[in-house]
Image: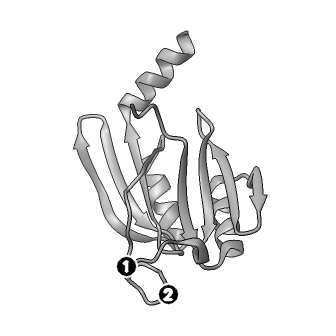
Amino acid sequence: MLRGLTTVRYHAADLAAATRWYAELLGIEPYFERPGYVEFRLGDYQHELGLLDSSYRPMLGGADGSATGPAGAVVYWHVDDLPATYERLLAMGATQHEPPREFGEGFVGASVVDPFGNILGIMYNRHYLEVLESTARG
């Protein structure tokens, strides 16, 4: 039924600032842009990370439709060096959501809140690497 990740979407009241922040974090420019929305392709499988102007966000808890705090599902992106990635995110203005912790042998994760209020999860995930290696072998 669920076949794989297609697009993760984050919201930002200042789309231009969010685009610059994620471009710096990822080291790439968006591959797709239209008024109110930008999209990056990243990683081994070219997953999509989209940024949507907050004016399109469904009404949530706040009077302006914003969440009253970080909200939403935590999507974990695989990273090869979790401590270095976590420290870089904090240095770029993200704040701790969940500190780094081991979820099990070969699985270490953490999450931050980006400067725009979105939860960004990162994880060193040995299963991801096993799948990547098996697809490389054909």
Residue 121 is situated, as x and y percent measured from the top left of the image, at 41, 55
* Residue drawn at (37%, 31%) of the image: 126
Q: Which residue is mark 1?
A: 69
x and y percentages locating residue 53 in the rendered image: 63, 72
Identity of the residue furthest to the bottom in this view: 63
Identify whether 112 is placed above or below 104. Answer: below
Q: Which tag, 1 or 2, sits closer to the chain's start?
A: 2
Determine which residue is flagged by label 2: 64
The image quadrant that residue 74 belongs to is bottom left
Quadrant where the N terminus is found in the figure: top left
Q: Position of residue 133 (x, y in %)?
A: 49, 19
Q: Secondary structure at mark 2?
A: loop
* Residue at screen point 37% across, 79% down: 69
Q: Dots 1 and 2: beta carbons under 8 Å?
A: no
Q: Quadrant of the C terminus?
A: top right
Query: Tag 2: residue type?
Result: Asp
| Res 110 → quadrant | bottom left
Instruction: Identify which amino acid the numbered label 1 is placed on.
Output: Gly
Residue 52 falls in image quadrant:
bottom right
Which of 107 and 10 lies nearest the eye of the viewer? 10
Left or right of 89: which side holds 103?
left
Q: Is residue 107 left or right of residue 9?
A: left
Looking at the image, which is closer to me, 55 or 96? 55
SS category of the residue bearing label 1: loop
Colour convention: one colour
Q: How many marks?
A: 2
Neighbour class for label 2 at 10 Å: few (<14), some, many (≥20)?
Answer: few
Is any atom of residue 92 visible in this view? no
Q: Residue at x 62, y 62 (%)?
A: 51
Quick check: 44 above or below 24? above
Q: Is residue 61 above or below residue 105?
A: below
How would you rate the neighbour count of disc 1 (Cα within 10 Å): few for under 14, some for 14-19, many for 20 or more?
few
